[in-house]
Amino acid sequence: MVTFNVTIQSLVADMFLMYRCWIVYAKSWTVIIFPTAFWLGGMALSLYILIVPLIQPGGDLEHANTSSLHTFLAAKCATTITVNIYATGFIIWKIINTDFTVARRIQVANLAITSPATKHQVISGSIREKSRTPLQNTALILFEAALPYTLVSIANFIAVILGSNFSYITSAIEIVIIGLTFNQIITRVYKKRVSREQSSSNLLGPEPLRFSPPTSPSYVEGASHRQQEECGKQYVVYAEAHIATHPILSL
């Protein structure tokens, strides 16, 4: 049962990973020819791995514990690792390359609209920029999400080659970590979005307290002298409160 779950889930996960790579490269079939060939090979190996126990006397994997079956299991793990590294690497490379191209075009546009005296400041300012761009954050999130799955797949591959019982543990972990990989991407993206919104609100600062000036009755025809004095006092209070809350005048 564990072998069935790992085999099917890895095939589905690799299929979605290749789909992402296909979308990122503008639906280019050339890019996914290599991983698709390995994925089809992994599917053929999976069918063999799942069918062999059914034709064995015991009807399970323990009774079909032959050297040939371990070879097929190791080959299936190798195809999973290859597809994962290839697709993830190409996606990250495309994102980083796009980010670099956009940054260069922005720099060229800034140089085109600035005066010769300020060109050096534009160039040095772009060099000193250390904060990561949204595309760089996206590439980092994808790398961090794919790394645990890749490491567990490699550990499972080594355990299968050595014929160790540790492969049962790595296989069980691989079942869980496939789902966690996609959830980690969603969680990290949401976390980045929340932190970005909080940073924007902190930069804007709290909304200043505003006082509406009182309506002056002095402009009303027939206002008495006492009413004009009361209005003058109200304006003095308003002016003092406005100055006290002003970020510059209150210094």
Image (cartoon, rainbow, N blue to C red):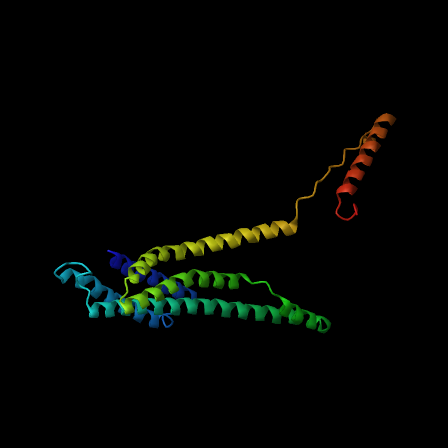
Looking at the rendering, which quadrant does residue 43 occupy?
bottom left
Q: Is residue 224 visible?
A: no
Residue 6 lies, in percent from the top left, at 29, 59
Residue 33 lies, in percent from the top left, at 34, 72
Give the position of the N terminus as an image quadrant. Answer: bottom left
From this view, report whether residue 6 is shown above or below residue 107.
above
Query: Residue at 84% across / 33% down in the picture?
Result: 232
Give the left or right position of residue 89, taking residue 118 as reference: left
Which is more toward the observer, 85 or 207?
Answer: 85
Query: Residue at 59% across / 63% down in the picture?
Result: 131
Which is more toward the observer, 238 or 161?
Answer: 161
Residue 249 lies, in percent from the top left, at 79, 47
Query: Residue at 37% across / 57% down in the picture?
Result: 177
Looking at the rendering, which quadrant does residue 39 occupy?
bottom left
Q: Is residue 69 visible?
A: yes
Residue 199 lies, in percent from the top left, at 60, 52
